Amino acid sequence: MEEITPPLRMTRQRQIILQELRSVKTHPSADEVYEMVRIRLPHISLGTVYRNLEILSELGEIQKIEITGKLKRFDGNIRPHYHLRCLNCNRIDDVPEHIHFDFDPSLNKATGYAITGHRLEFVGLCPECSEHHSHRLSLKLDKLTQKPKSDFLRSRQDFLTETTSHTIKKSSTEAMVLREEAPPGTL
Ligand SMILES: [Zn+2]
Ligand SMILES: [Zn+2]
């Protein structure tokens, strides 16, 4: 009885790891898989998770994505597909499966390799990081263009005051103050 319990338990653990991994599209690391399965397997060790992930990938049940050195992530989707990786936060997404690139068979001849497949990784900034990035960029640009902006406000103001508006006169003063407060380097 004692002897058959460990392999059975292993199988159950492996199945749960597989189920959890297939339930997400985030391409988690082994540590993240460990956190995910602990809810259902509170006594599982990180080592067991690592071992089972390796076994599952050898069995072809999951994909191991090895990107740039130490970054190792796992994918429950074993259909051939490409990945996108964010250079800032290391998020990994799937390229939609209908997007594919033709492999040129002449490469076999040209290299002498018996090529069995190819991997392609797209890198850049994910939507969140690129939004954050463009926000920071626009703040920078605002600073750099402070003078032209104030001038624009002022000339617009001059034009508007001619058509008489008291409230706009007030905002013109504010624009002037802004301009005066701008650090000398930006003017
Ligand atoms: Zn990102
Ligand atoms: Zn994937």
Image (cartoon, rainbow, N blue to C red):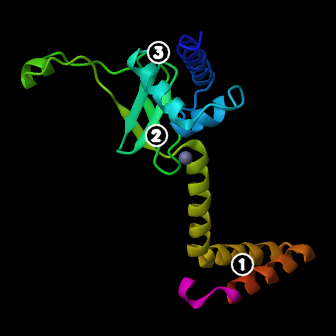
Distance CA(mark 3)–CA(mark 2): 22 Å
Q: Which residues are magenta?
A: 181-187
Residue 33 seen from this side: yes
Number of on-image labels: 3
Local crowd size for mark 1, using a 10 Å CA cut-off: few (<14), some (14–19), many (≥20): many
Q: How far across and down, in percent of the image, does residue 104 sit?
A: 20, 19
Residue kind at label 3, given as amino acid type: Glu
Dot 1 amino acid type: Arg
Whether residue 95 is visible to the viewer of this picture, yes or no, is: no
- The amino acid beneath tag 2 is Arg
Q: Is residue 37 above or below residue 161?
A: above
On the image, numbered disc 1 is attached to which residue?
154
Whether residue 185 is in magenta: the answer is yes
Relative image position of residue 87 (x, y in whole percent): 46, 48
Magenta stretch holds residue 151: no
**Residue 173 sits in quarter:** bottom right
Q: Is the CB atom of the residue marked by disc 2 within 8 angstroms of ligand 1's nearest atom? A: no
How far separated are the C-alphas under marks 3 and 1? 66 Å
Report the residue marked by disc 3. Answer: 61
Question: Which quadrant holds the C terminus?
Answer: bottom right
**Marks 1 and 2 close (CB-CB < 8 Å):** no
